[in-house]
Every structure is written in structure tokens, then in C-alpha cells.
Amino acid sequence: MQSDYEKQGKTPAIVAYITIIGTIIAFFMNQESKNAFASFHIRQALGINIGFYLIGALVSVFDSWLISSSFYIFIFVIWFYGILTAVREEQKPVPLVGPLFQQWFTFIK
């Protein structure tokens, strides 16, 4: 059973995973209520989005089908895992990099 607290933060948590624009919208949606569940997922989504652009720029230099497809599969898997945990109202960090996102983006409360 999940508490009402997670249910209140579910909408911004899910919106956060819909591109970088969704993350910004979710950040402002969460400013009034300061829901910890939503903040957790906003930090995860922000890390995924920033990682997508930074690592994507690096991967584009190699111009290799194998490297590019591996990158897109990795990003899709962590994005899907993040949005799935938000829908299930769970607070689990994405594999490999999730705990780092929680440390780096502590300014999101």
C-alpha cells in the first residue's frame, strides 16, 4: 500500500520523465507542495535528460552504429525504469547512475 503522500506527487513525478521540458514543468509544479516523492523523481529525470545530451554529444563524435545504438538502448532502459517506478509510486533510483543523481541535484527539494 502506498500512502496518499506518494499519490499527491505522482503527477509531477511522471511528467518529469517527459523530455527536459517535462522536467522543468514538474519542477515548477512541485514548488508549492514540496513533495519528496516528486522531488526524487525530478532529480532522476533531470539526470537522465542531462546525461542524454552530454553523453549523446560525445557519442556523436565516434560516428559508429554500434556505439550509438548501445547509448540509445541504455538511455531508454533507464528512462523506462524511472517512469515505471514513478507510475508504481516507488522511490527506487535508476540503475548505475541513480544514486549519483540524488547526490548531485540536492538543490531540488
Image: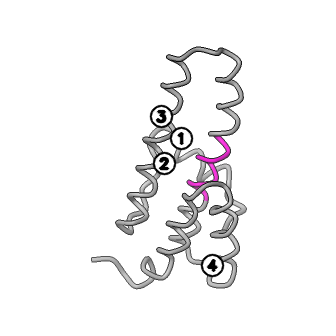
Choose mark 1 or mark 2, whichever is in front: 2
> Residue sitting at 50 percent across and 66 percent down?
14
Kindly report the secondary structure that dominates the magenta region of the rendered protein.
helix
Is residue 35 shown left or right of residue 70? right
Q: CA distance from mark 3 to mark 4?
A: 30 Å
| Image-quadrant location for residue 84 | bottom left
Q: Is residue 56 magenta?
A: no
Q: Secondary structure at mark 2?
A: helix
Q: Are marks 1 and 3 in contact (CB under 8 Å)?
A: no
Is residue 74 shown left or right of residue 28? left
Q: Which residue is mark 1?
A: 97
Q: Earlier in the sequence, mark 3 or mark 4?
A: 4
Q: Which residue is mark 3?
A: 74
Choose mark 3 or mark 4, whichever is in front: 3
Q: Are marks 3 and 2 in contact (CB under 8 Å)?
A: no
Question: For residue 47, which numbered disc appears in the image?
Answer: none
Circle 1 Cα neighbour tier, 10 Å, few/some/many (<14 / 14–19 / ≥20):
some
Q: CA distance from mark 4 to mark 1?
A: 24 Å
Q: How many marks?
A: 4
Q: Which residue is mark 2?
A: 79
Q: Which residue is mark 4?
A: 34
Q: Earlier in the sequence, mark 1 or mark 2?
A: 2
Q: Amino acid at mark 4?
A: Lys
- Give the answer, above or below, for where 51 lies relative to 28: above
